[in-house]
Image (cartoon, rainbow, N blue to C red):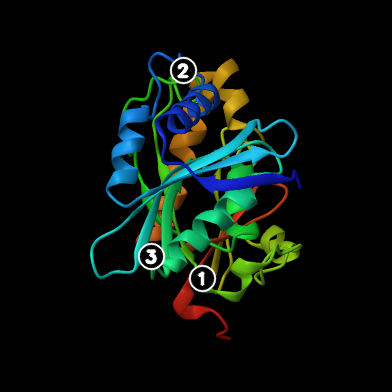
């Protein structure tokens, strides 16, 4: 893990640096950033927080995040955006967690692209959050250098900030159906590559859904195929969520685990 110093940012110069960092991550011109400095300043003034992670070697900006509070009385916070260099993301999320807990929050929500498997694994496995809502084309048309040409489906995750596992980095997947159960379950959908996309166990306790190895790279070289993956995964998730499933895990080989919470632990 990269050693960093993380602190909240309030000054104009620091917020401008965070804005430039986000522009670089989302591959937009710095003249038209996805999160302008004046907007970040307003969010801070309203009680939100901008966290910045600085590399201990040279004070280089290596990560940043923005969080605000949700509806009054719900003890909920919303992470508007977070991005970080490899090895820095966990520290940034823990800084957000500490800030939120100090102010009485108990949960934090955010969204991410469900086709980005590495982010799913980070959110569901490393942090222990749960995918609680599937949003179809949430932002509409996006014109940044990462999402351009695709539909903006997002998965909402809810993070229990007070859960014990939030305080430590888990080294293994959370408890759930083992891989052999997944591979032995009947296929219900086929992926654009012709192999199984989704499987469901006969007890209707788990659904598994596969995502492509690298959707960002696929989108750049074959946007039509990437969109076919988008629609295929969307069909699985919307059907499963309508039946009460939530996303609870992501395997190293790119398979989501969706679970019925009310049936966990039943025979």
Asked if residue 210 shows in the view, the reply is: no
In the picture of the structure, the residue carrying the numbered disc 3 is 243
Is residue 135 among the parts visible in the rendering? yes
Q: Which residue is mark 2?
A: 28
Snapshot quadrant of residue 168: bottom right
Residue 15, by quadrant, is top left
Task: Name the residue carrying label 1.
Answer: 204
Q: Is residue 266 left or right of residue 28?
A: right
Q: CA distance from mark 2 to mark 1?
A: 44 Å
**Badge 1: residue crowd in 10 Å (few <14, some 14–19, many ≥20):** few
Identify the secondary structure beneath mark 2: loop
- Mark 2 and mark 1 residues within 8 Å of each other at the beta carbon: no
How far apart in space, not on screen, are marks 1 and 3 (Cα)?
Answer: 10 Å
Check the image and report above or below for 265 versus 15.
Answer: below
Q: What residue occupies the far bottom of the structure in this picture?
A: 267
**Residue at the spot x=31%, y=33% of the render?**
39
């Amino acid at each position: 893990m990269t050693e960093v110093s993380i602190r909240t940012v309030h000054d104009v110069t620091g917020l401008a640096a965070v804005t430039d960092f986000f522009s670089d991550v989302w591959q937009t011109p710095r003249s038209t950033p996805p999160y302008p400095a004046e907007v970040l300043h307003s969010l801070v003034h309203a009680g939100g927080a901008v966290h910045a992670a600085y590399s201990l070697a040279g004070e280089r900006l290596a990560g940043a995040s923005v969080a605000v509070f949700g509806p009054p009385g719900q003890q909920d916070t919303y992470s508007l955006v977070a991005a970080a260099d490899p090895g820095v993301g966990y520290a940034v999320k823990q800084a957000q967690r500490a800030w939120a807990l100090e102010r009485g929050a108990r949960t934090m929500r955010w969204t991410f692209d469900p086709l980005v498997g590495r982010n799913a694994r980070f959110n569901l496995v490393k942090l222990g959050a749960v995918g609680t809502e599937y949003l179809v084309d949430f932002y509409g048309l996006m014109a940044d250098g990462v999402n351009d040409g695709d539909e903006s489906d997002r998965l909402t995750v809810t993070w229990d900030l007070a859960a014990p596992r939030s305080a430590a980095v888990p080294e293994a997947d959370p408890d759930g159906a083992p891989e052999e159960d997944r591979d032995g379950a009947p296929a219900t959908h086929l992926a654009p590559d012709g192999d199984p996309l989704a499987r469901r166990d006969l007890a209707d306790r788990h659904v598994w859904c596969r995502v492509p190895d690298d959707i960002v790279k696929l989108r750049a070289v074959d946007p039509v195929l990437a969109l076919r993956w988008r629609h295929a995964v969307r069909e699985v998730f919307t059907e499963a969520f309508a039946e009460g499933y939530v996303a609870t895990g992501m395997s190293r080989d790119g398979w989501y685990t969706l679970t019925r919470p009310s049936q966990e632990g039943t025979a």
